[in-house]
Amino acid sequence: MATLHAKHYADAISHLDAPLLLNEQVAENTYLMRVRAPAIAATAKPGQFVMIRLAGLDAPLIGRAFAIYDVHPDPESNAADSVDLIYLRKGALTRPLSEAPVGTMVSLWGPLGNAFRDDPCERLIMAVGGIGQTPMLMAGRDALQRGWADHVEMIYGARRSSLLAGVSDFRDAGFAVTTCTDDGSEGRQALVPDVLAERIQTLQQESPDAKIRVLTCGPEIMMEKVAEVGAAQGVDVQVSMETPMACGIGICFSCVAKVIQEDGEWDYKRTCVDGPIFDAEQLCWG
Amino acid sequence: MPVIPDVTAPTLQTTLGRLTLPNPIMVASGTFGYAREMQSIVDLNRLGGILPKTITAEPRIGNAPWRTVETSAGLLNAIGLDNDGVDAFIEHHLPYLTSLTAPIVVSVAGRTVEDFTELAARVGACPGVAAIELNLSCPNVSGGVDFGTNAESCRSVVASARNATSVPILAKLTPNVTSIADIARGAADGGADAVCLTNTVLGIAVDWRKRRAILGNGMGGLSGPAIKPIALRCVHQVRRAVEIPIIGIGGIASLDDVMQFLVTGASAVQIGTANYYDPTLSMRLIDQLPAALGELGAGSVAEIVGTLE
């Protein structure tokens, strides 16, 4: 049965109309938008998301969920000011959004959802694919800045080189990035779960006692395989789930995923308030 | 800053049978969770009424995803009354809800007259419940819809629920019928304090490449601005045919929409799908309502209800 109370209500939420400060293509079919939203920037935690729609328009009607990629302070006051989101141009919102000029108003609400756990580990490996890199800049940087991980690395896969977005941001933040592509156009021609399995094996041989944690986000089939790798090699995996969402706040009960409960049975849980971050062993795949 | 009462401001209080609301802006069942979710962006105590998600006697797991899909100016849903059952609701959600000052209207659904009657008795006995809404019209659960498509079934379930409790009874009806006025007359004959018009319109969305319905349940209920004219037409038809207070619901997304429902014959409205995509709308509507009443020269909501020529 659905839980009585969600684990993470959106208690730091703000709902505002905000201008686009930046909206530019950063890779094939991939865009970065910056929105002035101080209240959201001030409280956003790694792994959280916002809901966005184009202000004042009835089409598309329903908001779309975007992982928070980065937050920036105001250069003068140094107070939290803006939020960056990276998105793929693919649907009824993101097509017009990708053409919206700076200054266009978007309606957004957030920050939403829980956050990645920050209990200490020696090695943090972020295994991402497709557009799943978007929650990881804040997560890895937080790990290094607050010291809950000693080393941060990323295994980032895409179909081809031109779809990789943000690699320089990740390297600048101090992550060791391994890229892999389906066609071999950049990095290794390999799949993320396979590269991850090799990497964990190497790390475990080098230092058998080092605590490794994997964060994963991307296509569900990739995340399922990453979860299998983690289970097989005894490594803690946290999954950032994406399910079709209508509100982001917990009021519509659309975005459910099968989550295993204390009694060992699964129940549909709202990804927006009980997630989007789940421990891999909580999830019932497929 | 202290708010100085304006003695000339219209009164927003509205009365439906035995139920009096502080203002006509309610939030619809199934579109507001259990209200706790909205605590940080909506001043819950200002709402005219809160309808938590429909409860059933036993817990229900709900339908397989996808549960919602956007369509033109609307949202198609088949959630499947995912809820923890009445016991969990009374133990865990109701204490929070009844700690609020806004009227709490508990939405219940069942498969039989006995289900509705027992739920009305259980919930009606709980302190702080202002009214009970009988969800006679959820299109995603077989059984419930039958009560909303037959006037005599509607009358008998309403009468039985009404006899089981002293709190006001609202009947939420489906628009998926030949004559909504006949069904509303059944609800009135059964003793309903008001009818809620309407629930969602039955629809389907299809992925032609996969040759499959998009929703896990196949068909679903359409809501949002796309259905507003249908809901407004239902209010109009019932207002002309039956003497029963009406709560309007269906695609309300602006103060203009609210005023259209009031003038057409609704004494209150419920905000539904708009809570999903404009979560603070209800607060703005309450702020804006006095000026619109003033524009019509009305000193109260009641003065404009059903004044359509």
Image (cartoon, rainbow, N blue to C red):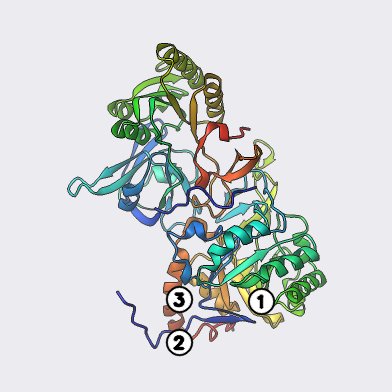
- Label 2 marks which chain's residue? B
Q: Residue B15: name its quadrant.
A: bottom right
Q: Which mark is residue B168?
A: 1
Three-letter amino acid code of the residue under disc 1: Pro
Residue B192, given in percent of the width and then of the height, sits at: 71, 77
Spot occupied by residue B25 in the image (x, y as percentages of width and height): 52, 72
Q: Which of the image's four quarters has the N terminus of chain B? A: bottom left
Give the CA distance from mark 2 to mark 1.
Answer: 31 Å
**N-term mark: 2 or 3:** 3
Q: Secondary structure at mark 3?
A: helix
Q: Is residue A116 above or below residue B115?
A: above
Residue drawn at the location 45% of the way across and 84% of the way down: B10
The residue lying toward the viewer, choosing from A152 and A235, is A235
Observer able to see residue B251: no
A28 horizontally vs B268: left or right = left
Q: CA distance from mark 2 to mark 3?
A: 12 Å
Residue B297, disc = 2
Q: Amino acid at mark 2?
A: Gly
From mark 1 to mark 3, how far is it between C-alphas?
A: 26 Å
Q: B181 and A115: which one is in front?
A: A115
The numbered mark, 1 or 3, whose residue comes first in the sequence reads: 1
Would residue A75 appear left or right of A241 to someone viewing this image? Answer: left
Q: Amino acid at mark 3?
A: Leu
Which SS class for mark 1? loop
